[in-house]
Amino acid sequence: MATKQGNKVWTDEEREAMQASARERKVAAKRSPEEERAAGLQDLQDSLDKLSGDDRAMAERIHEIVTAAAPALAPKTYYGMPAYARAGKDGKVICFFQPKSKFKVRYSTLGFQPDASLDDGEMWATSFAVIKLTSAVEARIVELVTKAAG
């Protein structure tokens, strides 16, 4: 488990995630939308390749589900994790997959950002723990991603 060391505010894992995000934004700013989509897909694939075991299998399956449910979303990485964003210059991340190994926790997470269209009354979930991909879980992911993509 990640622990704080000395006077550090961020764990090593959190610091690495922030550095990955800064690198992603810097590189993305120089690309055309077409280049961004192709490079984003490659970045996402590279992030999948770094995973192992059940994290990798789950991330690959979620990638298949998201791209089938919302093909207009552009693949990319978000803090080094597989993510899907609105196409174009704003490139706002709509959803992302956080493997359990990222922060050494007991479950992976499918998360949604504020620009996801999940609004449902005065309160709604923005992250979902995923332990196993059953047909019911996959159907729920399709439902959530389709709604989030607008």
Image (tube, rainbow, N blue to C red):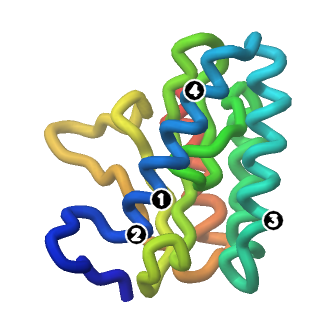
**Residue type pointed to by label 3:** Asp
Front-lying residue, 87 or 49: 49
Gap between marks 1 and 2 measured at Cα? 6 Å
In the rendered image, the vertical position of residue 129 relative to residue 74, given as above or below? below
Q: Give the residue at x 50% y 26%.
A: 92
Q: Which residue is mark 3?
A: 49
Front-lying residue, 84 or 148: 84
Gap between marks 4 and 1 measured at Cα? 15 Å
Gap between marks 3 and 4 measured at Cα? 22 Å
Give the percent coordinates (x, y) of residue 124: 26, 48
Local crowd size for mark 3, using a 10 Å CA cut-off: few (<14), some (14–19), many (≥20): few
Q: Give the residue at x 76% y 75%.
A: 57
Give the percent coordinates (x, y) of residue 127: 38, 57
Local crowd size for mark 4, using a 10 Å CA cut-off: few (<14), some (14–19), many (≥20): few
Gap between marks 3 and 1 measured at Cα? 18 Å
**Residue type pointed to by label 2:** Asp
Q: Earlier in the sequence, mark 2 or mark 4?
A: 2
Give the percent coordinates (x, y) of residue 93: 51, 34
Q: Which residue is mark 1?
A: 16
Dot 2 lies on which element?
helix
Judge left or right: residue 29 versus residue 8: right
Q: Which residue is mark 2?
A: 12
